[in-house]
Amino acid sequence: MRSQSNAELELAEDQIKVLERKLASALNELNEAVVLQKDSEWRLRLLLKVVRNLSMGVVIMDADFVVTSVNDAYCQISGLPESQILGTRPPFESLISKDMELYKRIWVALKSEHRWDGELWGEKGGEQFALHIAITAIVDDFGTPSQYAAIINDITERKQDEERILHQANFDALTNLPNRALFVDRLEQSLLTMARAQHKLGLMFIDLDGFKLVNDTLGHDKGDDLLREAAVRISSCTRDGDTVARLGGDEFTVIMPNLNDAKDAPLVAQRILDALARSFDLGGTESFISGSIGITIFPDDADSSNDLLKNADAAMYRAKDLGKANYQFFTADLNAQVAERLQLKNGLVQALERGEFQLYYQPKVTLSTGKVDSVEALMRWDNPSLGMVSPARFIPVLEETGMVVEVGEWAIREACHQHQRWIEEGLSPIRIAVNLSARQLREMSFVSVLQKLLAETGVGPDGIEIEITESMIMSDKDTAIIALTELHGLGIRVAMDDFGTGYSSLSYLRQFPIDTIKIDGSFIADISNSPEDAEIVRTIISMGQTLNKSIVAEGVETEEQLELLRSYKCDQIQGYLFSRPVPGDELTEFIREKNS
Ligand code: C2E
Ligand code: CA
Ligand code: CA
């Protein structure tokens, strides 16, 4: 406007008269322009003043992102004086460049859309802070950014408030455990993950028995104390990755993802029951409560969170009905299995001292001579109320409780005594093969215990043989190698049991000091009918012989099987065809007859 007015003034000088009127109006215009200019300068000053005093940080940067001006608020936010910010890259840039992905995203947005805004987290003096930053690129006529303006807000407090509100919405104020909302969320998340990974998940409902009484008699404060303590105890019984939540009142729940076996859930449940059974000290008053627990398993029982919740709830009520202070599975089948295991476990605790275990013996007949040089010792449990229990049922329970180490020691001692008894009865020494459990082999002291037993009973290393399975070796190869090598060094023979059912790799046999291979009975069962099984057995025998191993066929029941095995040049035969496992004294005559 000013240049236009100047031009008109020049014209007016030349044609002053002609343009007198025009000049007057031009002057008028000029006057107006001056007023306007003053006005815009004033406005600009006002604007600058506003920006300077703005509570949000403002940073202006040149095309190279170097700060050209900054307001007080930003100096305060960054904790730096203006002099240190001007002429450098803005301090907030360091928050962006920590994350290369973000850094790239911001620059792409500034180039294409000429703006970016978002939240950045940082740390100052050990304290977390959050900034909201909006950056605008001021572009020239060619669309190239010539300046950048950033508006920065410190949103730390707002974020903290949000988090507090989020926490309040998701956590129970009394126990600080996840509340129902978060529990449902976590359960649904876990179900998705478990479904993808094809893993089981256990869901447990816990309701405190007798809580109402505490609350009514001791008051709500003491009731609250008890709930807090119960929450701590329940949490301490769970595994990493489990979620304990309070659903309200005296109801808790546990999500147990990645359950290997449904039967692992009772371990956790029992721990919780034990923890809740301990007395609660409520400010000098001792109180006792218990818990009733319902357990359901995904995906066996249901696959939606709703159905699982219903199941666990129903199972919990069954636990209440059954007298409280116990846990129940949703399915009858699992309940029965757990009950049986519990019954076995309770019975087994005293079985050893009550003399309920026996060793039976089954002969192995050497085909080339028709003689019995060795027998296998097989354990029997004769319980007054359960009757004769199969080792297939009770050995796993002994393993689980660790009792197998003690009972296994008893079996070896018993086998040693039998070895001596047969010698006393005039038989030539009969080697007795004893089955070992994985747990025994893992005991570091196993070899020395065995040595002690041999010395104690006066049996030579040739009198006892050890039977182990492939899976036992493979589950802890290093320990197995050490133990087996030691045994071998003592002159004790080792047999690989159930060969063909596990890894069945003959190449492994080379790595381990194994003397004998026992071909699993399941292969022998079909050799007369199945050419494949016959071929497998024939191959195992011939390869075993190449490796210089002695071969035993288990579970031989028919003459047909016997003849086939004889034609394959199997070394020894064990099975009902010759004898079932029987008490030692019942086998004496059989051995005497065979060996005469
Ligand atoms: P295993 O070591 O494979 O024992 C062979 C099983 O086959 C025995 O079952 C035996 O009675 C059975 N058997 C023998 N001949 C025949 C036959 O001709 N036909 C059929 N169908 N079966 C036959 P049992 O006595 O019930 O023992 C089962 C398993 O329990 C044993 O399998 C062994 O793994 C374990 N076991 C037994 N005693 C002990 C022990 O003292 N310690 C340990 N750790 N485990 C033991
Ligand atoms: Ca065996
Ligand atoms: Ca076997």
Image: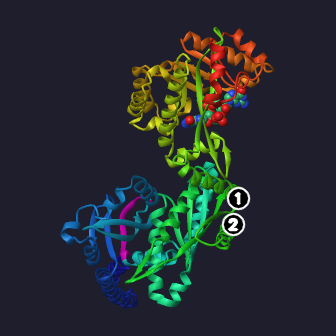
Label 2 sits on residue: 311
Residues at marks 1 and 2, CA–CA distance in whole angstroms: 8 Å
Q: From the viewer's perspective, is 567 left or right of 217?
A: right
Q: What range is drawn magenta here?
A: 143-156
Task: Please provide percent x and percent y for residue 465.
Answer: 51, 24
Q: From the viewer's perspective, is 505 left or right of 299?
A: left
Q: Is residue 82 visible?
A: yes
Do the residues under discs 1 and 2 have CB atoms within 8 angstroms?
yes
Amino acid beneath label 1: Asp
- The numbered mark at residue 301 is 1
Nearest the viewer among 72 and 519 is 519
Query: Vertical placement of 537 versus 113: above or below?
Result: above
Tell me which label, 1 or 2, sits earlier in the chain.
1
Q: Which residue in the rendered view is the most extreme toward the right?
A: 529
Quick one: label 2, few (<14), some, or many (20+) residues within 10 Å?
Answer: many
Task: Please provide percent x and percent y for residue 399.
Answer: 53, 44
